[in-house]
Image (cartoon, coloured by chain):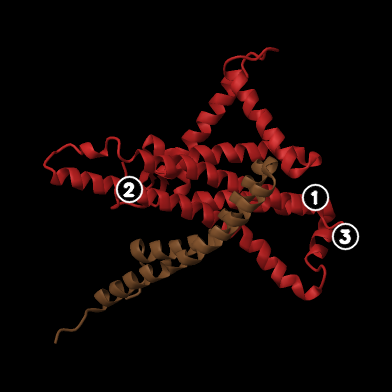
Chain colours: A red, B brown
Amino acid sequence: MHSTEHLGPRKIIGFFDGTVFITETVLLALIIAAVMIIFALLSARKLEREPKGLQLIAEIIVSTIYNFTTRTMGEKNKKFAPYIGTLFIFLLLANSAGLFGFRPVTADVNTAFALSIITFCLIQASSMKSKGIKGHIKHYGDPYPFMFPIKIIEDVAFPISLAFRLFGNITGGMIVMALAFQGLESLSRNLGSKIPFLQFLIPLPLNLFFDVFEPILQAFIFTMLTMSFVTMATMGHEDH
Amino acid sequence: MNLVTPEAFVLGLSAIGAAFTMVAAFGIGIGQGLVGMKGVEGVSRQPEAKADILQTMLVGQAVTETTGIFAFIISIILLFANPFIGML
């Protein structure tokens, strides 16, 4: 599937003379988005009171996400649930694209940073909306004014660490899978066969860990940290 | 006596540096193990709260892993996208 010669994303479509291009990461992310949109449209075609089929699956997903969000963020933050749900499902599908033979979408630094920049903007905007712009700036000066640069650094370092955590974990998994596949192929070539028959069932436990468990865990961690920081931003400080 | 070319020197030291950076994994192992220890103790004291404790423990372990991931990224950059070759 993957080899260790090309570890970066390949450029697929080039416009003009090749300076503007679309990589396979962007293409796969667009395909994932299209799959999610088509599933959403198909499952809400004819809404019935007794759901069955696709509508049942969609209702289970939506109600689970809403329960999870209200349990973690409180009842009044229910309006963040659509973003949290989209983030979680997109991360699930994007991290585990290795299961289908593609290069994982979030194994590209750009995707990880795009998602964490959206989270950063959400945190700043919700903090400004709940405290007012003056309150938001004054919050950096609590409790002592000399902590102003420290708090700014903390606010900027959070999305950077969020993005690098996601990118590092998924890229590490991808490299280990590539090494394992290449090792099995050269081993079966040394045993004298042209077809890499050792790649048949042996990588399955590695696939189970790096392409099923690790994507779910990383998606969960990203979503959980987003929710915690948005809650802390909207809560303000009740004891001041 | 043959001299080492500058490119070979840079590549060789980059390889040593990339391997040496991953000593950070020592700290991750201890840190995540401590979090796991407290998680298991919490579950043993109150088995009804197992789902909540498990969730909190996983979040704690993933945040502890972050600095090790930073070391891993530096290692990968030194091995596969070495910036020092272009500066020669």
Question: Residue A8 location, x and y as percent?
Answer: 37, 52
**Quick one: label 1, few (<14), some, or many (20+) residues within 10 Å?**
some
**Pick the front one: A87 or B43:** B43
Mark with earlier residue (3, 2): 2
The amino acid beneath tag 1 is Lys
Q: Are marks 3 and 2 in contact (CB under 8 Å)?
A: no
Which quadrant would residue A88 be assigned to in this image? top right
Which residue in the structure is indicated by mark 1? A129
- Kind of residue at badge 3: Asp
The residue drawn where x is 49% and y is 34% is: A32
Give the residue number, with chain letter if any, for mark 3. A239
Does the rendering let one see residue A27? no
Q: Secondary structure at mark 2?
A: helix
Q: Is residue B3 left or right of residue B59?
A: left
Q: Residue at x 59, y 56 (%)?
A: B37
Amino acid beneath label 2: Ala
Chain assignment, label 1 = A
- Mark 1, secondary structure of its residue: helix
Q: CA distance from mark 2 to mark 1?
A: 46 Å
Q: Chain of mark 3?
A: A
Q: Position of residue A224 (x, y in %)?
A: 64, 47
Q: What residue is shown with label 2?
A: A178
Between A52 and A142, which is closer to the camera in this rendering?
A52
